[in-house]
Image: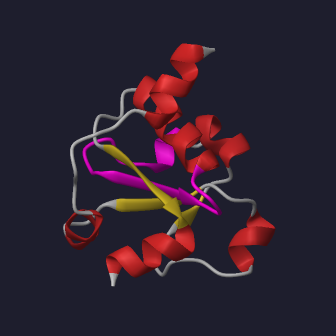
Amino acid sequence: MIQLFKNLFQKEPQVSLKELAQQGAQIVDVRTREEFRGGHLQGAVNIPLDELSSKLSSLDKSKPVITCCASGMRSATAKSMLKSKGFTNVHNGGGWSGLQHKLS
């Protein structure tokens, strides 16, 4: 259990999410479809967290991935899941509205 929390909240080197997005990073919003319909980042793909493992083939492992959700918790889980499935360049963007400000 402690390792799970370490994996979810470990510090990483600072990366410019804006630069990653400008370079073609995939933005994956892991909120529910209903939440996504209520507002989302332009260009984000909606893959609800509970469907992520079955839809990995829709993502390109060679491109960076930025995960987001409402608060950052589900996106942290999504990041860990993607890393465990062989995605190497994955970043937790946190809540989508905060990420929107970081990308502007």
Position in image of residue 94 (x %, y %)? 50, 58
Q: Nearer the viewer, residue 77 or 86?
A: 77
Query: In percent of the image, x 47 and y 24: which residue is there?
Result: 6
Question: Could you say which quadrant of the image residue 66 lies in?
Answer: bottom left
Horizontal side of residue 41 vs 21, given as left or right: right
| Foreground residue among 54 and 75 | 75
> Which part of the image, by quadrant, shows the N terminus?
top right
User: Does 39 lie within the magenta span?
Assistant: no
Percent of width and height locating residue 22: 22, 73
User: Measuring 72% from the left and 42% from the top, which residue is drawn there?
Assistant: 50
Residue occupying the point 54% across, 69% down: 96
The correct choice, above or below, for 36 with respect to 64 in the image is below
- On whether residue 66 falls in the magenta region, the answer is yes
Is residue 36 something one can see in this rendering? yes
Q: Quadrant of residue 70?
A: bottom right
Report the magenta residues as a range: 56-72
Residue at the (53%, 43%) spot, across then down: 76
Q: Is residue 63 above or below residue 88?
A: below
- Picture quarter with the C terminus: bottom left
Q: Is residue 43 visible?
A: no
Q: Position of residue 43 (x, y in %)?
A: 45, 76
Above or below for 88 versus 65: above
